[in-house]
Amino acid sequence: MTTETTTVPHQATSPEQSAGSTPRATAEFWFDPVCPWAWMTSRWMTEVTRVRDVEVRWNVMSLAVLNDGRELPPEYRRSMDEAWGPVRVVTAARLAHGEDVVKPLYDAIGTRLHPGGRGDERMAVVAEALAEVGLPAELIEAAETDAYDDELRASHQRAIDLVGDEVGTPVVSINGTAFFGPVMTPAPKGEDAGRLWDGFALVTSVPGFYELKRTRTQGPVFD
């Protein structure tokens, strides 16, 4: 995608606080539909838009692209081979029907894959999601072709160019400064989501800040 971010204030504010005087913050979010951790972060980012004056532009990246050419255990290699389908379909849908379909289609796919527990039915899930959001059923054919891979790889590379090679999905960018993550479980809601956004926005405003991490001890909590 070729979108550009706008200037974001160092301290994010709610719509009520801004009263039209503070520029709307714009973030970009990169996801692979099959990644449960990207799904968790996307639920936080969705909640942020309810409690802060933030616009999010939703972009694809790909675990299949990220792992292309790498030596992987056989089971994980099969999973990566199967990961091409959903992200190709989202890419094809964006190209044919515009950016506004990306988030609804992602929501419909992700709800089924992650809290719905249907990770072993990826393409059936994608077909149902297309129907739910009113997109043509034939878009499912994009899963089996590399016709959209140049666009997919370009979107993926834009995230990597911002954040570097030693990351996965999701990637979030504010004002051209991007980080892998934040990784969380469960996704905070309400003002808790807003406060995390405020802190994340502050971190992105510090030029020398690169990393903050601890070992994950819990899997995704889909509440």
Image (tube, rainbow, N blue to C red):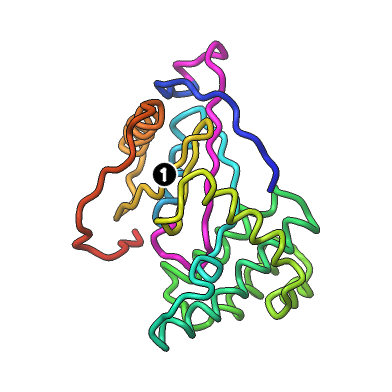
Q: Residue furthest top?
A: 21
- Residue 212: in magenta span: no
Q: Residue at x 54, y 47 (%)?
A: 161
The answer to whether 196 is drawn above or below residue 110 in the figure is: above
- Location of residue 79 in the rendering, given as x and y in whole percent from the top left corner: 47, 80
Closer to the camera in the image, 91 or 135: 91
From the viewer's perspective, tell me whether residue 152 is left or right of residue 168. Answer: right
Location of residue 162 in the rendering, given as x and y in whole percent from the top left corner? 51, 43
Residue 24, magenta (yes or no): yes
Q: What's the residue at 49%, 64% (across, down)?
A: 111
From the viewer's side, name the closer residue of 89 and 110.
89
Image quadrant in which the C terminus is located: bottom left
Stretch of the chain drawn in magenta: 16-38
Q: Quadrant of residue 140?
A: bottom right
Residue located farthest toward the bottom when viewing the structure as drawn? 74
Query: Percent position (x, y) of residue 167?
Result: 41, 56
Name the amino acid, label 1: Phe
Number of residues whose C-alpha sits closer than 10 Å to that of mark 1, classed few (under 14), some (14–19) or many (20 or more): many
Q: In the displayed structure, does residue 119 sit left or right of residue 124? A: left
Residue 181, given in percent of the width and then of the height, sits at 39, 49
146 or 194, which lies in front? 146
Above or below residue 75? Residue 163 is above
* SS state under label 1: strand
Image position of 211 with respect to 183: above or below: above
In the picture of the structure, the residue carrying the numbered disc 1 is 179
Identify the residue at horizontal 40%, vertical 56% (top origin): 166
Q: Is residue 141 left or right of residue 154?
A: right
